[in-house]
Image (tube, grey):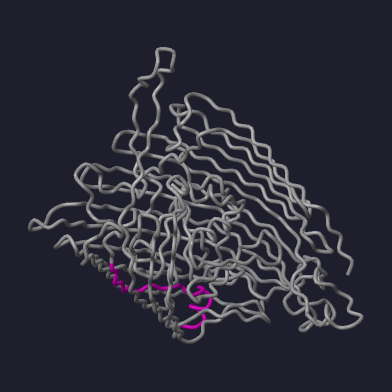
Amino acid sequence: MTQQRSAAIILAILFCFHRGPALSQETESPPPQPSQETPPSPSEPAPQTTPPSEPSQQSTPSSQPSQASPGASSKPVEVYTFGEQPVSTATEKNVRQRDFELRPTTTPVDILTSSVPGLYTVQHQGGGKADEYFLRGFDADHGTDFAIYVDGIPVNLPNNAHGQGYADLHWLIPETVDHIEVTKGPYFVQYGDFDTSGAVNIITKRRSADSSVTIMGGSYSIQRYLTILSPSEGTPLTPYIAFEAYHENGPFKDPMGYNRYNLFTKFTLLSTANSNLSFLGTFSHSYWDASGEIPSRLTRQPGSVLGRFGSVDPSQGGNTDRNNLNLVYNYSDANQSFNAQAWGYFYNLDLYNNFTFFKSDPINGDEIEQRDKRAAGGSYLNYRRNYFLFNMPTETFVGFSSRTDRARVGLFNVVDRVRLSTQQNSQINQTSLAWYAQQELRPTNWLRAQIGTRLDKFFYNVRNLTPDAQIRTSGSAQGFIANPKVNVILTPFSGTTWATPPQIYLNFGGGYHSNDARVVVANPGQSALPRALGGEIGLRTRLFNRLDIGLAYWRLHLSSELVLDGDTGQFEAEGPTQRQGPEIELRYQINDWAGQ
């Protein structure tokens, strides 16, 4: 194979249109608003001087004029103070924006892999397809056992045409990310479906310090254009707008022709000392061609007709759209917080694959089209209150969430993206409701305990849309599951001059991933919500004010696992599995200014 390679050319042009006084070095990352956490992570009662429900990165604006020389500007300077929120497990963490700045990335998945210890991702068959996720022994495929949220909006898609829990993040612009809340294991009441190996909630910025234009380019016709519009603080509605265009052909003999267009908008509709109302809208469209899988014998045998970058069926690929709307209200004072959120999105996917080439149809080939078109929406209501019970610091957290998906999902036999026949074509309506509560107690200064439960109820309805389809599934079903959550945090030892007080974590909880509605309706005796039970013991400390150490040993039992059938591209529910293993995280601060 003759492969043409061009020298890498990387051009980055950054134009900053700066208005007003610059933020100090400590204020490069504007603080996340409380409305961005949905639902907020449970935390210990805060000191009386700090509202207990604020997110992990606290902010304190200051509007006092500068006391500099008379010629200096009298405009207010923003000042932010950052603090760490107590965690419930040794592997829970909050990844700050500064970490992203130290590791520049151009895709949301790059942010996840560089920020979440133990998480690996791979991309195959064209850049527009969702990545595959690997975490804690799970090949979670495209998201089956790994829950992903953006500002509380669920990214995972139940009953998706390509796989249960399909989570495509390509609609998110990396430069708009402020921080990421990372949890591992099913120990948190606020996370439900697909949270077995872990979950992440990606929080976007309220605004950027400056407006900017960025142009990047490189080998294989890589081009990326980014524009960010962020007017100065005090502008009505505080608009924050970003637009991204991306193109790539890849190293393949048949060019990938991957094109992606993303628009991100955020507005602050109301902002007072105690409350905040924000609106988020994102719009995304992408399309691509893919070379797909190829048999190794066609690349290795003498006289082989294909190289590593060849293709048996170059008509594979697809196109996808996702448009999100999100409205969030938050209220908080010194003792309580209330959060209300309504979200919705429109989604479209046309994916063309050929897994078996000519095995089933020697004449037309085995190319298939996986079609998913849906609208979805949901809500959150969360209330948290700190108080004293018998002179003991206590926190109560209760919440409710809902989600409804209306999806038209189909599987078709095609040739060069032209339909020949229908394997399955269904209208799938799914609604889920969840109630959750957690009580936190601190009887002594060395013991903190969280006891919670989560109840989930699912309603399924499947209707066949094509009478002559090979698979005609219709019917209704329901599912219910209750899961306990227990977290115990011990600090039995005092700190020293060279080490902070070590914290010991004991965790136990139940979670689940939902099965595809078509499988649930077609197999009434099969569980709709397979349970996952997990336990973990861990330790965290900091040595010499430089080295952060996190140690954990975890174990997880899953009553049923979804397994991919490579010949058909379909998922089947199989028997129970069990995973276990150690986890070690080390983070060293080289000097006083690096990584702060």
**Horizontal and vertical percent position of residue 294:** 77, 76
**As drawn, is 415 to the left or to the right of 208?**
right
**As drawn, is 128 to the left or to the right of 299?**
left
Q: Is residue 248 above or below residue 438?
A: above
**As drawn, is 340 to the left or to the right of 319?**
left
**Horizontal and vertical percent position of residue 508:** 31, 74
Res 437 quadrant in image: bottom left
Q: Give the tally of numbered discs.
A: 0
Stretch of the chain drawn in magenta: 504-524
Residue ID at (56%, 43%):
264
Q: Is residue 166 above or below residue 300?
A: above
**Magenta stretch contains residue 231:** no
Q: Is residue 328 visible?
A: yes
Residue ID at (59%, 69%):
426
**Magenta stretch contains residue 520:** yes
Residue ID at (58%, 78%):
571
Which quadrant of the rendered structure holds the N terminus?
bottom right
**Horizontal and vertical percent position of residue 127:** 68, 59
Q: Nearer the viewer, residue 313 or 446?
A: 446
Residue ID at (59%, 68%):
132
Res 524 quadrant in image: bottom left
Q: Residue furthest top?
A: 70
Q: Residue furthest front?
A: 497
